[in-house]
Image (tube, rainbow, N blue to C red):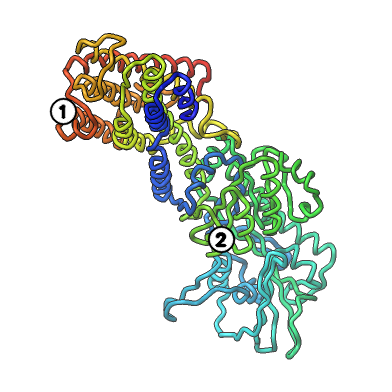
């Protein structure tokens, strides 16, 4: 724009240096110098608000990215649930015991000693504290099983651990070898579908019996029954190992099944409902049994239909990329028994579909998915250092509801940036038009470059920052995510900032300038020296006009659609402090010697302030009419 008008000035015959100074002033008028610090401070303050809502932001741009999220891929355990495991069901001796509150039949612990031996010893818990108050640290699932053992069949004799075959996502089981009194014994626990194929026998009525197809069917039915209650099901098995022989997870004896309850977090159903109202799809991605995942999903309101899309890791292996894209189009999706590399594939597929993806993770193997997602979300309590290092944000409480809070804040940040952008653009137009009048109609320059900088970097800074920390609109989570390609500076922002608000402010500025000049005896066509006291007073009138209308404008910009009488003047102390600062600064610039010397201003008579009052009231009326029209045309959801 500066270059265009420099060339225009040369065509109109302006002297080179006058044209050059005019161009510099034009650039000063058009560039919002206060935008960058306001933008940065707005993002920083948003991260502080998020921290108070249990969300730690590691990268500032992710604040804005959260607001455009269309899909959240979330873990189940510890994020949707409380990660507080309790053993509530057992399958022993061919019978299902689904209510442990009333205890087990007499003698069942002695008859199923191998089961309680596996449950009490096959773990990676760490002992801590003195002997009289010994506690265990580690996986809540293993803690729950140990508590069951200590209550029903406590292990008294210390036993040496010889070897461990650790758990991993592919094996989905762990085994340990202990030196028992009658020789080494391998103890195994894991997912039934990984343990049962390794078993050739089962413990029944105090003895090892063959594991027939009919027995396998009953075991699988027992698992389904527990999983349909939302329980996490583990199979426990064992085998004796000959001394000096390598332990092998084969020809195991199934000791029984254990069902653990992990209740959903009470605030999660409301958070799921908020996501659905906001047009955000939530996909559960878990390593648990599909029946367990589906039961929890129904309990928290993630699934309401009779036939949701349930994808397992085994099914995912059979799907092509195109088939997976089609499968992910379903409204309700549960992904169960998913390996970390499959989680990454789901994220990549959603990105190819044009979705803005946020994904949660806590383990080392989740790092690729966290890094690939638009917003990687690590767990602060249960997450590993690797997961937190690659993530964009960290949940300090591991709670899914905190993600929804972060999305709300992210949307608010984007809206707030547009608010203070509109606010800044309005006075830029009021600074531009006087320069055009100076060149095109030979009007004396109504405002000097130094006065414009005083507005951009002085009077408007705190009020613009106040708009940057506005509270989220009450309807912000009841509208769909903005399109991924939508720019911050769009046609609506330009029309409102430059036209609806900016042209009116420019009209008030030029009118006030001419009013002060004519009050001093000036007539159109006369020249005024830059050193003339009347010129100083007239430019001060222009400066005052912009500041007064920006005081009104800051309250109008608090919402693009809500009435100023609805948003009011309270609720944002920073805006009130900014308005107070604007008033103090314009009075100092106008009525103090150092202000006059610094900016080339002069004291204004009271009549000039009265002249500005109708412009302020008319701006409110015009903007209220525009907002009412928008509300009628596009009613809130």
Q: Where is residue 541 in the image (x, y as percent from the top left)?
A: 25, 21
- The residue wearing badge 1 is 591
**Do labels 2 and 1 touch, CB within 8 Å?**
no
Distance of mark 2 from mark 1, alpha carbons?
59 Å
Of residues 201 and 327, which is closer to you in this image?
327
The residue at the point 77 percent across, 67 percent down is 196
Left/right of residue 532 with respect to residue 69 in the rendered view = left
**Residue picked out by circle 2:** 387
Q: Where is residue 604 in the image (x, y as percent from the top left)?
A: 18, 21
Q: Which mark is residue 85?
A: none
Disc 2 crowd rating (10 Å Cα; few below 14, some 14-19, many 20+) is many
Specify whether 386 is left or right of 6: right
User: Callout 1: few (<14), some (14-19), or many (20+) C-alpha neighbours within 10 Å?
Assistant: some
Look at discs 2 and 1 and give the one toward the viewer: 1
Is residue 372 positioned above or below 574 on the image?
below
Disc nearer the start of the sequence (2/1): 2
């Amino acid at each position: 724009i500066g270059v265009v008008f420099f060339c225009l000035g040369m065509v109109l015959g302006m002297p080179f240096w006058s044209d050059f100074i005019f161009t510099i002033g034009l650039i000063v008028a058009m560039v919002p110098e206060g935008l960058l610090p306001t933008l940065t401070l707005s993002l920083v303050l948003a991260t502080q608000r998020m921290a108070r809502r249990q969300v730690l932001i590691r990268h500032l741009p992710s604040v804005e990215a959260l607001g455009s999220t269309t899909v959240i891929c979330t873990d189940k355990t510890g994020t949707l649930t409380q990660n507080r495991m309790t053993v509530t069901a057992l399958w022993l001796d061919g019978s299902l015991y689904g209510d442990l509150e009333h205890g087990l039949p007499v003698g069942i612990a002695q008859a199923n000693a191998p089961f309680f031996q596996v449950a009490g010893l096959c773990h990676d818990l760490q002992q801590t504290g003195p002997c009289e108050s010994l506690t265990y640290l580690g996986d809540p699932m293993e803690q729950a099983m140990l508590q069951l053992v200590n209550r029903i069949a406590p292990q008294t004799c210390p036993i040496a651990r010889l070897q461990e075959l650790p758990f991993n996502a592919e094996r989905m089981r762990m085994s340990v070898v202990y030196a028992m009194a009658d020789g080494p014994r391998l103890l195994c626990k894991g997912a039934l579908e990984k343990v049962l194929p390794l078993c050739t026998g089962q413990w029944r009525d105090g003895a090892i019996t063959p594991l027939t197809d009919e027995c396998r069917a009953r075991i699988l039915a027992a698992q389904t029954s527990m999983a349909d209650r939302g329980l996490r099901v583990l199979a426990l098995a064992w085998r004796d190992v000959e001394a000096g022989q390598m332990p092998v997870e084969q020809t195991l004896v199934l000791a029984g099944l254990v069902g653990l309850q992990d209740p959903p977090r009470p605030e999660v159903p409301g958070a799921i409902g908020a996501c659905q109202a906001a047009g955000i799809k939530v996909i559960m991605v878990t390593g648990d049994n599909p029946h367990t995942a589906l039961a929890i999903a129904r309990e928290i309101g993630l699934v309401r239909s009779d036939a949701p899309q349930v994808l397992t890791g085994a099914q995912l292996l059979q799907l092509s990329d195109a088939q997976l894209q089609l499968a992910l189009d379903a409204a309700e999706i549960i992904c169960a028994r998913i390996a970390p590399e499959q989680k990454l594939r789901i994220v990549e597929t959603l990105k190819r579909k044009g979705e803005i993806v946020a994904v949660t993770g806590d383990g080392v193997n989740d790092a690729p998915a966290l890094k690939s997602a638009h917003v990687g979300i690590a767990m602060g309590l249960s997450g590993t250092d690797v997961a937190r290092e690659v993530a964009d944000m960290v949940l300090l409480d591991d709670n899914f509801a905190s993600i929804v809070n972060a999305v709300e804040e992210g949307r608010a940040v984007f809206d707030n940036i547009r608010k203070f952008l509109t606010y800044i653009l309005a006075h830029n137009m009021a600074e531009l038009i006087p320069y055009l009048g100076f060149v095109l109609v030979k009007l004396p320059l109504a405002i000097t470059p130094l006065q414009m900088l005083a507005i951009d970097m002085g009077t408007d800074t705190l009020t613009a920052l106040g708009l940057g920390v506005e509270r989220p609109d009450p309807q912000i989570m009841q509208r769909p995510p903005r399109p991924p390609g939508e720019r911050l500076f769009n046609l609506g922002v330009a029309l409102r900032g430059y036209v609806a608000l900016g042209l009116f402010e420019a009209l008030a500025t030029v009118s006030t300038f001419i009013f002060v000049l004519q009050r001093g005896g000036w007539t159109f066509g006369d020249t005024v020296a830059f050193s003339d006291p009347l010129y100083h007073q007239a430019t001060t009138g222009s400066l005052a006009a912009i500041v007064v209308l920006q005081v009104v404008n800051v309250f109008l910009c608090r919402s693009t659609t809500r009435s100023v009488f609805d948003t009011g003047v309270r609720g944002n102390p920073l805006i009130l402090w900014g308005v107070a600062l604007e008033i103090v600064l314009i009075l100092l610039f106008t009525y103090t010697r150092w202000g006059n010397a610094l900016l080339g201003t002069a004291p204004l008579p009271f009549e000039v302030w009265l002249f500005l009052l109708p412009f302020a009231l008319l701006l409110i009326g015009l903007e209220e009419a525009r907002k009412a029209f928008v509300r009628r045309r596009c009613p809130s959801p």
